[in-house]
Image: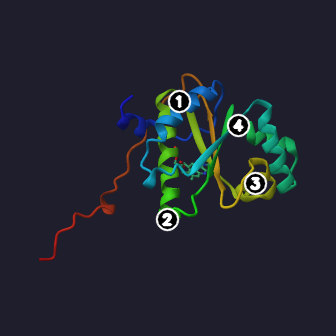
């Protein structure tokens, strides 16, 4: 799949079943995604993969935080066979400002989503108010200044579902050709 097709046909997928990439395949795709632009090549991120019953530990942490039932939270964490938590691990002493480090994480994550899509996997990046909840931080073993940036839900879109090719928006009003005032 060429890059233009990958970009125009990738969509956030709510309904995802198996199969999901194996840890080895995820690692392979991540290696490529880590070639995204990254000032200082700091790679200020890490991923935590959860599948099978291991997803229930996150459900328990979410339930502990919001007081809802573990079953209700399990229904969320089991929406895809692979749950990949994206952790931002900024380098606090680097001369590269934190916002640039965050931008590098976003570039890597977008590249990964496109690579997953090109390989036949669907994904959606989900966030929410509970990312900073103490039980979640504890489960993910987050140390300051780390913070979770969300979960990539990964799996396979149901077979036969038509592609939802995007109509690329007209962004002409966001573009100006600068001409020097002299
Ligand atoms: C940082 C980030 C956080 C997101 N959080 C959520 C979320 O919590 N729930 C959700 O349904 N989608 C979430 N999304 C997905 C967007 O809603 C989705 O990309 C947008 O609607 C455009 O749809 P598309 O990805 O199919 O083009 C998130 C996307 C990004 C980049």
In the image, is 125 to the left or to the right of 99?
right
Specify the label residue 97 is tagged with.
2
Badge 4 or badge 3: first in the primary sequence = 4
Q: Which residue is mark 1?
A: 28
Q: Nearer the viewer, mark 2 or mark 4?
A: 2
In the image, is 180 to the left or to the right of 5?
left
Q: Is residue 39 visible?
A: yes
Badge 2 or badge 1: first in the primary sequence = 1
Label 2 – label 3 distance at C-alpha: 24 Å
Q: Quadrant of the C terminus?
A: bottom left
Mark 3, other Cα within 10 Å: few <14 / some 14–19 / many ≥20? some
Q: Which residue is mark 3?
A: 137
Specify the label residue 79 is tagged with.
4
Label 3 – label 1 distance at C-alpha: 27 Å
Residue 174 x/y as whole percent: 33, 62
Q: Nearer the viewer, mark 4 or mark 3?
A: 3
At x 53% / y 30%, what residue is drawn? 28
Badge 1 or badge 4: first in the primary sequence = 1
Residue 55 x/y as whole percent: 77, 37
Q: Nearer the viewer, mark 2 or mark 3?
A: 2
Label 2 – label 4 distance at C-alpha: 35 Å
Residue 54 x/y as whole percent: 78, 35
């Amino acid at each position: 799949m060429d890059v233009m097709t990958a970009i125009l046909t990738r969509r956030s997928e709510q309904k995802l079943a198996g199969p999901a990439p194996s840890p080895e395949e995820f690692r392979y795709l991540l290696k490529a995604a880590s070639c995204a632009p990254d000032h200082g090549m700091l790679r200020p991120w890490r991923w935590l993969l959860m599948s099978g019953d291991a997803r229930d530990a996150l459900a328990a942490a979410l339930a502990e935080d919001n007081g809802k039932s573990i079953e209700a939270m399990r229904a969320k964490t089991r929406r895809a066979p692979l749950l990949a938590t994206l952790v931002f691990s900024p380098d606090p002493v680097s001369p590269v400002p934190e916002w640039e480090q965050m931008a590098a994480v976003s570039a890597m994550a977008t590249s990964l989503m496109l690579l997953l899509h090109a390989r036949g996997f669907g994904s959606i990046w989900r966030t929410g108010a509970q990312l900073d909840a103490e039980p979640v931080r504890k489960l993910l073993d987050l140390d300051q200044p780390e913070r979770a940036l969300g979960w990539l839900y990964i799996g396979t879109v149901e077979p036969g579902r038509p592609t939802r090719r995007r109509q690329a928006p007209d962004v002409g009003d966001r573009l100006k050709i600068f001409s020097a005032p002299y």
